[in-house]
Image (spheres, rainbow, N blue to C red):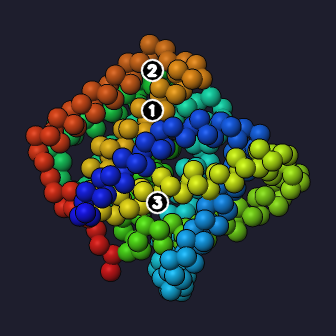
Amino acid sequence: MDAGRSGVMAAVAAFSLWGVLPLFWKTLGFLTPGGIVAQRTLWSLLLLLAMTLGLREWSALRGALRSPRLLAWHGLSGALLASNWLLYIWATLNDRIIEGALGYYLNPFFNLLFGVIWFGERHSTMRLWAIGLALAGVAIQIPAVGGFPWVAVTLAVTFSLYAVVRKVSPLESRAGLTLETCLMAPFALVWLCFAMPSASAAFGGGLGNGLLVAASGLATLLPLWFFGHAARNIRLATLGMLQFIGPSLQLVIGRAVYGEPLDPGRLVSFALIWLAIALYAADAVRRPVNPLAGRVRGG
């Protein structure tokens, strides 16, 4: 299978998983958002190190740990990822899944913008109109939510910047993710040691909750692994188009499962964003592109 096709399949898998994960994170409500981020970081690292050992990929990881350039890039990507995780988990646990969905609807349009700025990707007039409509949808959210939708915008910006950094890095997706989690792990350990009242509390005080906590590593690893592969092998514009799978599922879950409000102001906002998506999709069909045209290869 060629890299472009595998990248598209990986993106579909990643965004579908992210779309339904609010159901899982809600079950971890016995922990704080910071505790969940710390746990998912450490459990992800354990799984990644086990895979590195099994696949005998220690040399790539050792080389990355000795490279100041790679440490800097992945320190930045790890900080962006942790920030995104923390805000997303906080929004999910505080009944703001729909606002989080708005952020991930906006994320592809920031991908378009950053693709132009950093990778020289070109976009048609129709796609520029799509960006304008998406921004108008954000503006309408201001009176709808009683203020600037900072949760949505921050989620969109941090995740788009994460995609930029991962696209630039020469490391393969699994090695890059392992390096990121290695760099995040000390902060996670400090959090668990000083912010949790006891070891039992860190695991929810029971076997069932402890198993859910351990599963956070797998829930974190699978979509990120898929996303890392996709970000390195397809254009940011293509990645952005496929991203709409995730927030659509989140919106349905927030409204249908948890009964979050979707008032007329928010409906108008989402309608503008869906119109932007329709314009983008129509342009993508009319102007097929080589999925590898915007790929950046690390040196």
Front residue of 6 and 40: 6
Q: Type of residue at label 3?
A: Trp
Which numbered mark, 2 or 1, is in the foreground of this view? 1
Q: Mark 2 or mark 1, which has the lower sequence index?
A: 1
Tell me where residue 83 appears, x and y as whole percent. Answer: 58, 52
Residue placed under numbered mark 2 in the picture: 266
In space, the residues marked 2 and 3 are separated at their CA atoms by: 33 Å
- Residue drawn at (29%, 43%) of the image: 241
| Residue 236 visible in the displayed image | no
Q: Does 278 appear above or below 15?
A: above
Q: Type of residue at label 1?
A: Leu
Which numbered dot is residue 225? 3
100 left or right, relative to 135: right
Tell me where residue 126 appears, x and y as whole percent. Answer: 16, 37
Front residue of 220 and 119: 220
**Label 3 Cα neighbours within 10 Å, binned few <14 / some 14-19 / many ≥20:** many
Q: Type of residue at label 2?
A: Arg
Which numbered dot is residue 165? none
